[in-house]
Amino acid sequence: MQFREDLVRGSIVPIVLQLLREKAMYGYEIAKMVNERTGGKLEWKEGTLYPALHRLESNGYVSSKWEEAPSGKNRKYYVLTRKGMAELVTRTVEWKEFSYAVNSVLAVAR
């Protein structure tokens, strides 16, 4: 099933912050992890992920560093900051309350 863009857009920030809480990752690795963990239900493209990463970095939620990968190729790794961790906590609480509210309405519609 293909999800509507507005639904996907609203979930990008908490998902990226959670993954970076686990470890530093480069962009393609983040997209691959999302695809794996969702069983292919969320397949992020570069046009979805990289603008979000740049916004997170400009807001101070993540920082980045270039590192050489084992293949010899340079990759930009993103790291969760302390400010990003606080934002993750806020977004997680907000997401849980929002999804509960939406589900409460949709459950009545059955």
Image (tube, helix red, strand yellow):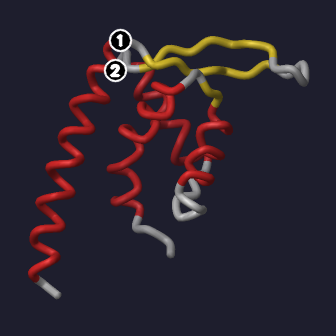
Indicate the position of residue 70 as horizontal and vertical percent values.
87, 20
Disc 1 target residue: 82
Give the image quarter of residue 55: top left
Crowd band around label 1 with a 10 angstrom C-alpha radius: few (<14), some (14–19), many (20+) = few
Q: Nearer the viewer, residue 74 or 58?
A: 74
Q: Nearer the viewer, residue 37 or 3?
A: 37
Kindly identify the amino acid type of the residue bearing the numbered disc 1. Answer: Arg
Are discs 2 and 1 less than 8 Å apart at CB?
A: yes
Residue found at the very far right of the displayed protein: 71
Residue 47 vertical position relative to residue 6 in the rendered view, above or below: above
Q: Nearer the viewer, residue 60 or 32?
A: 32
Disc 2 target residue: 85
Disc 1 is placed on an element classified as helix
Indicate the position of residue 27 as horizontal and vertical percent values.
63, 34
Left or right, residue 94 beside residue 105 = right
Which quadrant is the C terminus positioned in?
Answer: bottom left
* Residue shown at 41% from the left, 61% from the top: 5
Indicate the position of residue 14 as horizontal and vertical percent values.
36, 38
Residue 48 vertical position relative to residue 29 in the rendered view, above or below: below
* Residue shown at 49% from the left, 37% from the top: 51
Residue found at the very far bottom of the displayed protein: 110
Between the C-alphas of marks 2 and 1, the distance is 5 Å
Give the image quarter of residue 83: top left
Disc 2 is placed on an element classified as helix
Residue 38 vertical position relative to residue 58 in the rendered view, above or below: below
* Residue 49, numbered circle: none
Crowd band around label 2 with a 10 angstrom C-alpha radius: few (<14), some (14–19), many (20+) = some
Left or right, residue 99 beside residue 5 = left
